[in-house]
Amino acid sequence: MSYQAHFRVWRGDADGGELGDYTVEVNEGEVVLDVIHRLQATQAGDLAVRWNCKAGKCGSCSAEINGRPRLMCMTRMSTFTEDETVTVTPMRTFPVIKDLVTDVSFNYRKAEQIPAFEPPAGVAPGEYRMAQVDVQRSQEFRKCIECFLCQNVCHVVRDHEDNKEAFSGPRFLIRAAELDMHPLDARDDRAQFAREEQGIGLCNITKCCTEVCPEHIKITDNGIIPMKERVVDRKYDPLVRLGRTITRRK
Amino acid sequence: MSEKIEKHSYDVVIIGAGGAGLRAAIAAHEAGLRVAVVCKSLFGKAHTVMAEGGCAASMGNVNSNDNWMVHFRDTMRGGKFLNNWRMAELHAKEAPDRVWELETYGALFDRTPDGKISQRNFGGHEYPRLAHVGDRTGLELIRTMQQKIVSLQQADARAKGNAGADDARLKVFAECTITELIKDGSGAIAGAFGYWRETGNFILFKTPAVVLATGGIGKSFKTTSNSWECTGDGMGLALRAGSTLMNMEFVQFHPTGMVWPPSVKGILVTEGVRGDGGVLKNSDGKRFMFDYVPDVFRAQYADNEAEADAWYKDPDHNKRTPDLLPRDEVARAINSEVKAGRGSPHGGVYLDIASRLPREEILRRLPSMAHQFKELADVDITSEPMEVGPTCHYVMGGIEVDADTAAAARVPGLFASGEVAGGMHGSNRLGGNSLSDLLVFGRRSGEGAAEYVKSLRGQYPAITDAQLEDVMRVALAPFERDGGENPYEVHHELQDVMNELVGIIRKADEMQQALDKLAELKQRAQHISVSGPRQFNPGWHLALDLRNMLLICECIGRAALLREESRGGHTRDDFPAMSAQWRKVNLICSLADSGRDIDVAEQPMIPMRPDLLALFGKDELKKYFTEEELVDVPEEAHA
C-alpha cells in the first residue's frame, strides 16, 4: 500500500532557487497536497504552500505538477507510477514569494477594475424575479473558485509580462460575461468594457484556460467567444450601422 | 528589540474575512467608518466557501406557511432550548432581508418556477427554507460579498473623482495573522498586533474596536471538515483579552463526512444530499434512521418508509423522513450502527442518492458532490452509494456576546460574530443556520462596533511601547529555542487526544485523561522550536496557532467534564439523559489569573420572554423545562 516516492519541489524566493530532492512516503488514496504536507511535517518545516479546503473548493493550492497547472488537492498520487518522479513548481506566470507560493495580486488588481454589479433601478430587495434558465448562464461562471490556473496558463500573459497591463485574463473575461448575462444587471457596456479595458481582443481562443479549469467551466466557448461576438455586434454590425445612418439623415 | 513595526490606525478592525467578517465590514463602512479586514488567507478563500447546502431564511417561497416563528421554533428545537433565545429570534426575523440584500449585491441563487429564490429541505427545518446555489452556496456568499467590498471601494474612488478602487476607507489585509489584542489602562480595546505571513514582519493596528469573525476550531480534531485556518484564533484572542467563552462543550459532528480514502477522511458531504432525497443505509441495506427517532421529535418525524417517502411530495400530510433529523441525532445514530457491526467496509454507513433520483437530476442538484467523489474516491454517486461517517464540523460554543450588538462580554470595544460567537445555536446547530447567522450577526457586529466607536467621540485609546515589546517577544519565542518540540507533532497529538477522548461520545474518565494529556501538551508547547526564516514559514505559523488551539481544547474538555447530561453536541455515555436542571445553565470559561489555566463557572440562563415561550405547546416544553419554569405558560401553542 505505502511506498517511497521521489519528489522534486522548487525551493527558493524572489532572488532565485532550485529544485530540492525528497524521498517521501505515499499512502493509498493520497493526493499531491498530502505528500507536500508530509514533507512539511517531517523534513521541511518551513516549506511554503498555500491551501485551505483540501477539497477543490477554495482554489488556493494551485501549482504546476510535472509541468501541468493543477490543484494539488485534486491531483491523486495514483495518476503517477510508483517510480515516477513528481516535480512540483510554483505557477510560472506570477512572481514567486517563497517555494510554492506566488504573488497573485495581479488578479486582485484586475478584479478591482471591473465595474460592479449594478442593481436595477426601482426593484426593491425581495422583488428580484429571474428564471432559472436565465441565471444558469451566469451561474456557470460564478462556479469559479479563483484558483487562477487559467490566468497562469494563458499565453497572452504567461511569457509576456508586458501584456499584463492591457489584458485582464480569462478569469476576468468570464466575470465580464457573467455580469453581461446577469438578467438584472443595469449596465449595458460590459462588452464594450471587455474590449476597451480588458483587452479581450488579445485572446486568440486557444482554449488553454478551459483545459486547466478544475471547475470545468467552458471559459472560451461559453464566456469569451460570446463576449467577443457581442463586441463585434456592437462595433461592426452592418444592420445597426445602416439603421444609425438612416436615423441621422432624418 | 528595535524592530521597526508597520503601524496603521483604523476605526474598526475586523479579524476574519469569512461571511461574518465581510458582512461586518460592509456594515461598518456603510456607517461611515474607516475599516480594516485582516485575514490569514487570500481574500475570498475563507472557510465559508466550504458551506454547501444553503442559507436558511423563512422567505416562504416554496411553502408559504413558513415564517420567522416557525424558523425560530425549529432553531430552538434543534439547539434543545439551550440557545440564546434573543439571538434565535433576531436571526429568524432578519434572515430573509439579509438574503434578499445579497441579490442587490449581485448574488444569483437558484430559482423557483415563478422566478423567486428557490429553497430546499434540510435537517430540522419544517419547511423548505434554504436559499442555495446547487451545492456551492458558501462560495456564492463569499464571492458576492467580496465583490460588494470591491464595489464599495469603487464607490469611494468615484467620490474622489477617480477610476478603479480606493481602499483608504476599507482595506483588506490578506495573509496577515493577528496574534494578540492590546488593551489600554481602562481595559478597553486599543489595538491588534500580528504578522504578515508573506514576510514575517510585524504589523500593528491601532483601533478602538475589534470585531472577531475568525470562525471555528475544527483543526483541533483529527477528523474534521474544517480548513487549516479553523484554529480557534478569535476565541484564544478573546480569552487572553479577558473576555469569556460559553458552552464550549457543544461541538457538532456533521453526520456525513467522507470516510475513504484516508486522505479525504472528514471532508464534508452536504446535508443537501438527504434534503434532496438521499437516505442512510447500513450494511444490511436497511434504512436505520427509523430506529433512532428520539421521543422529543416523534411528533414531526415518520416511523416508516412509506410515509417518509410520501413526505417529499406531500409535506403537508406526511411526517418528514428521520434521515433529516437534526445533525446530532443522525451523527449518534451512525456511530451506533458502526459500533454494532453494521457499518460499511471503511467504518461508515451508506448514503444512497443513486437509487432515489435520476442521474441528470443528481448532477444538476449536487454537481460538486458528484465531482468530489469522482475525483477523490473514484465513486460515481449517480450509480453507487457513498460511504459516510461523522466529522467535526462546527462549534456551537463561543465568545459570550450581547445578542443585539454582538459586544463581547467584559471587554469594551470587542465584538464577535459568526461561528466564533456562542449562544445562537444552543447545543446543536441546524444545517443552513450558519450562513444566515453570519449574515444577520455579521451585520449587527459591524453596526455594534460602529455605534461604540462613535460614542467615543474621537477619544481613541493608546498603546505603550512596553506592550508592543511583550507581544513581539511572545511571537518570536519559537525562533529563540533550538532543538525543541516539533509543532506539527504537538498538533497531531492534540488532534488525536480530542478525537479519541472528547469526541462524539464522552466519558468522565476519558475526559480526565484528555485534560491530563492537554496539560502535558501545553508544557511541551512551551518548548516548541522552529527553523528557517520568518518569511512564509508554516512551522512558525502553526506554533503560534497552537497557543489558541490548546486553550480552546482545554475549555472544551473542562466544560464537557462538568456538564453531566447529554444534549445536542455533547453526549455523555455516563449521563445519557437530558436534564431540565442543566438546561438552565450556561458554562462560562475564562482565563485564570495565572494567565495559563481555564476557569469554568456556571451561569444561570436568562428566562425566555413569555411571548416567545408561547410559540410552543406546553407539552413540548415539558420535555425540556422544569415545572417551575412553565407555571405561567398556556397549554396551547400561540401560532
Image: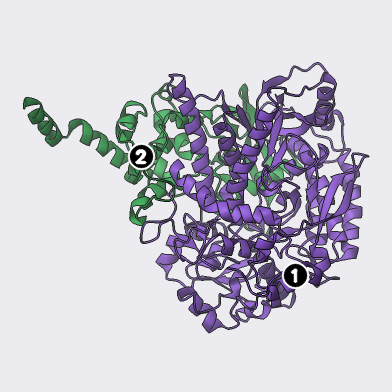
Chain colours: A green, B purple
Q: Amino acid at mark 2?
A: Ala
| Number of numbered tags placed on the structure image | 2
Q: Secondary structure at mark 2?
A: loop
Q: Whole-percent x and y of residue B628?
A: 81, 69
**Is residue A43 rendered to the left or right of residue B289?**
right
The subunit carrying tag 1 is B
Kindly identify the residue that appears in the image at 49 percent across and 75 percent down.
B316
Residue A24 visible in the current orientation: no
* Mark 2 nearby-residue class (10 Å; few <14, some 14–19, many ≥20): few
Nearer-the-camera pick, B136 or A40: B136
**Is residue B420 rendered to the left or right of residue B555?**
left
Residue B347 falls in image quadrant: bottom right
Q: Which mark is residue B339?
A: none
Which residue sits furthest right? Answer: B594
Q: Contact, CB < 8 Å: mark 2 with mark 1?
A: no
Give the answer, above or below, for where B420 lies relative to B289: above
* Residue that badge 2 annotates: A121
Q: Are marks 2 and 1 on the same chain?
A: no
Q: Which mark is residue B624?
A: 1
